[in-house]
Amino acid sequence: MKIAFISDIHGNAVALDAVLKDIEKKDVDKIYVLGDLCFRGTEPKQSLDLVRGLNTDVIKGNADEWVVRGIKKGEVPDHTLEIMNKEREWTLKQLDDEGLDYLRNLPTDLKLEFDKIKLHGFHATPSSLFDIVLPSESDEVLNEKMMKDDVDIYIYAHIHKPFIRYINGKCLMNIGSVGLPFDGLNKSSYGLLEIIDGELQTTIVRVSYNVDEEIKKFRESEYPNIEQMVKLLKQAAV
């Protein structure tokens, strides 16, 4: 069985389309989505529609929560709070009530089992949509914050920096970002699991997409933070 985990699309439907085509070529059996669907891209509605069209399990990310209720002081650096709320207002105008209700009602984690292999999927940590857990953390910190359940593999997103670590016989996998990678490589990222006879193989897949097309969409839009978003797309780093 092949299972794909995607996340952090951030309204980049160009990247999402490229990833879904790559997944189709790999004959994946099931796709799961770990949040951050719409915010900070030029095509929030198109991205949301593509995700909903997958007819699969989707969980909420911090950016989905922001779209629904706004960004609060302390959740982002003070100097970015005003402009990010303006971005959120622009995103709201692109969505309808049905889309907002969908985001509002998303669950916050996934617990799955395939061929006796147990998985726990969440956006940032099991207890938060907002906490940041980086690949540089020690095994002890990762174990304490992320790996308390009795499962075989923990899968998350949020930080836009994919990695795979094995700690005390368990696997922790960050699947990176479809629409806004932050690891210096401006290619989409997703996680691929292959389970055969109770054995698990984990892979980070990188997919090229037309970054220039997404930048062109920003430049032709009335998005309130164009230059910053263009910089993020070009550099794939914060």
Image (cartoon, helix red, strand yellow):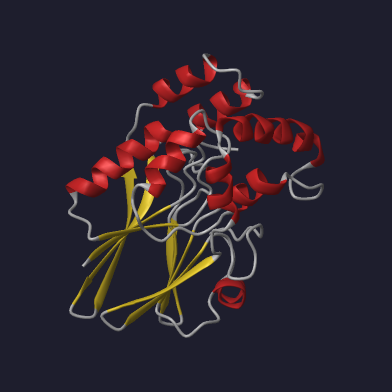
Q: Spot the residue most to the top.
A: 220
Estimate the x, y position of residue 84 in percent, counting from the top left: 70, 35
In the rendered image, the vertical position of residue 58 relative to residue 94, given as above or below? below
Residue 75 coordinates in the image, percent (x, y): 75, 50
Vertical arrangement, residue 115 with respect to residue 125, above or below: below
Nearest the viewer among 84 and 56 is 56
Residue at left offset 25%, top offset 49%: 23
Q: Quadrant of the C terminus?
A: top right
Quadrant containing the N terminus is: bottom left
Please indicate, yes or no, whether residue 185 appears anywhere in the rendered image: no
- Residue 120 or residue 59, whichever sits in front: 59
Residue at (38% x, 31% y) in the render: 14
Q: Nearer the viewer, residue 129 or 47?
A: 47
Q: Residue at x 51, y 53 (%)?
A: 35
Q: Is residue 134 above or below residue 224?
A: below
Q: Give the vertical position of 76 relative to 83 (above or below).
A: below
Counting from the top left corner in percent of width and height, residue 225 is at 65, 25
